[in-house]
Image (cartoon, coloured by chain):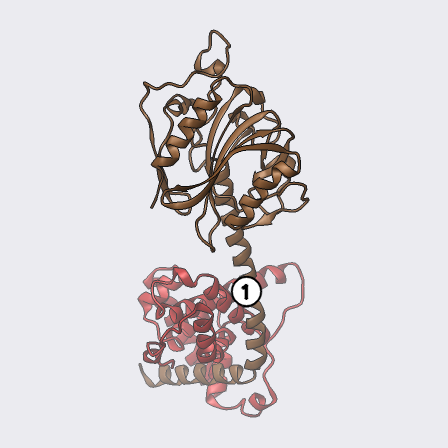
Amino acid sequence: MNEFELSLANALRDEAKEISMRTDQQQAANELRVRLDRADRTRRRRHFAYAAGAAAAAVLVLVAVVVTSRQASPTDGAGPAAPDESGAAPSFTATFLQPPLHATLPSWTEHADAQRNGASELFEESSCAGLYGASPCSDDADLKLRILTPFYFYPPGSLTTIEHPSYAEYVAAWDALESSGTATISDRSSATVGGRPATVMSLKVQEDAPGAIACPTATSSAVSQCAPLIAGRAVRVAIVDQGADAAPTVFYISLNGDAADRASRFAEFDTMLSTVGFD
Amino acid sequence: MVDRESWGAFVSPATPRAAVSELFHLHYRRLVGLAGLMVDSRETAEEVVQDSFESLYRNWSRLRDPQAAVEYLNRSVVNGSRSHLRHRKTVRATGLPDVEFVPSAESRGVDLSRHRDLAAAVRQLPRRQREVMVLRYFLDLSEMEIAAWLGVSPGSVKRHASRAIDTLRKRMEAWA
């Protein structure tokens, strides 16, 4: 660098110093604090949106979806297919759930591939799962098995969601379905699923309970955006305690309340529970 | 000249917020000076620097290492200043008033100094030449680095630098 260039460098340094000396760094620090607070709020909102998205994905992911009599036996239009004991029991791994888990699903889910949604797909009305508003499938025509993490849900009679429910809160809400006249509960027991405490119960749903299972966000419409309990359905649910700081994991099977094979389907569900492992 | 060695002395605190606050404490004035060399007002320079720190905070997790934060800030301030200048050009085209840099009373008092004259002459250079001068002689970047930062060829940097130096020499001779 020659003398002129050195002078130039010094001139720029002096100029920059003079400019900077007239700035109020304390005021600037205060402004930055406000900006970072705003960035934190934005980040938290995004985090919750991701969590809600994950919840939605978990809610909406169908582990095995909808085997209707029409799909299983297109020619006769009869009731749900009989349990297929000869089919291979599909193993299932859900890395998108927290905690991740694996299980051996009932063999009938092998036939549900055509209707199965992947983990990355959001639920759509056309998938006949009955979670998103009016299902194009009749309520009594499908057989569903779902695994999810409920980050938000509507307790019986509530107009607002409970966010990040604890295991106790979620179990209490299911128990309250009976006292609220929404469902009758039977075969309620404490159990161990994947080595963790769980509550298992069967329900005959008497009245629709929009949002009773889970919602994708805290402000989701119970009627149009959440997973409901639907009148006339028979449900068996297992709620697994994941500890004080984590939402429970929920497994449930839902089918027509009058289905002749309800007991065997529920037995398959219980067998599946015995295969669950958390990673 | 900026002491680039001192950039390496930064040790990242435990949290991004603490790290950004520490960087702000260490580099805010220098960066306002850098931006002030490129834009037309101190207020704009301060805004550009604030934007850069906020951007750093938002993107902290993407930094390859905490030491890269200072380079990120330098680059962000340069880019922000250039972006402002491009915007100002658009504003001028729409007839809105320009905001000129107003020297302080103190600076007017020493305006006859050689450094003041040189700095004033740099301000009057065409935008690209001015950018090259600031990056070369304030940030002490090489021609290759300047080319990468400005997205032009090293040959272009060399030409801009050469023309700028010629102009500045002539200006200083005329003022002598």
> Is residue A91 shown left or right of residue A41?
left
Residue at 32% x, 71% y: name it: B142
Q: Is residue A264 above or below residue A92?
A: above
Closer-to-camera residue (A3/B1)? B1
User: Within 10 Å of the Cα at label 1, are there few (<14), some (14-19), or many (20+) other Cα atoms?
Assistant: some
Q: Is residue B73 above or below residue B29?
A: above
The reply to whether residue B79 is in sight is no
Q: Is residue A253 above or below residue B172?
A: above
Closer-to-camera residue (A38/B135)? A38
> Is residue B18 shown left or right of residue A194?
right
x%, y% of residue B83? 51, 62
The reply to whether residue A257 is in sight is yes
Residue at 61% x, 38% y: name it: A177
Quadrant showing the N terminus of chain A: bottom left
Residue at 39% x, 82% y: name it: A9
Rendered colour, chain B:
red
Residue at 46% x, 23% y: name it: A263
Q: Quadrant of residue B90?
A: bottom right
How many numbered marks have been drawn onto this rendered protein structure? 1
Hey, which residue is sitting farthest top in the picture?
A75
Q: Give, as a three-letter code, the residue at label 1.
A: His
Q: Quadrant of residue A272?
A: top left
Label 1 secondary element: helix
x%, y% of residue A248? 47, 46
Hey, which residue is sitting farthest bottom in the picture?
B109
x%, y% of residue A238? 47, 38
Q: Which chain is brown?
A: A
The chain holding disc 1 is B
Q: Quadrant of residue B108?
A: bottom right
Q: Mark 1 — residue?
A: B84
Q: Is residue A60 above or below residue A110?
A: below
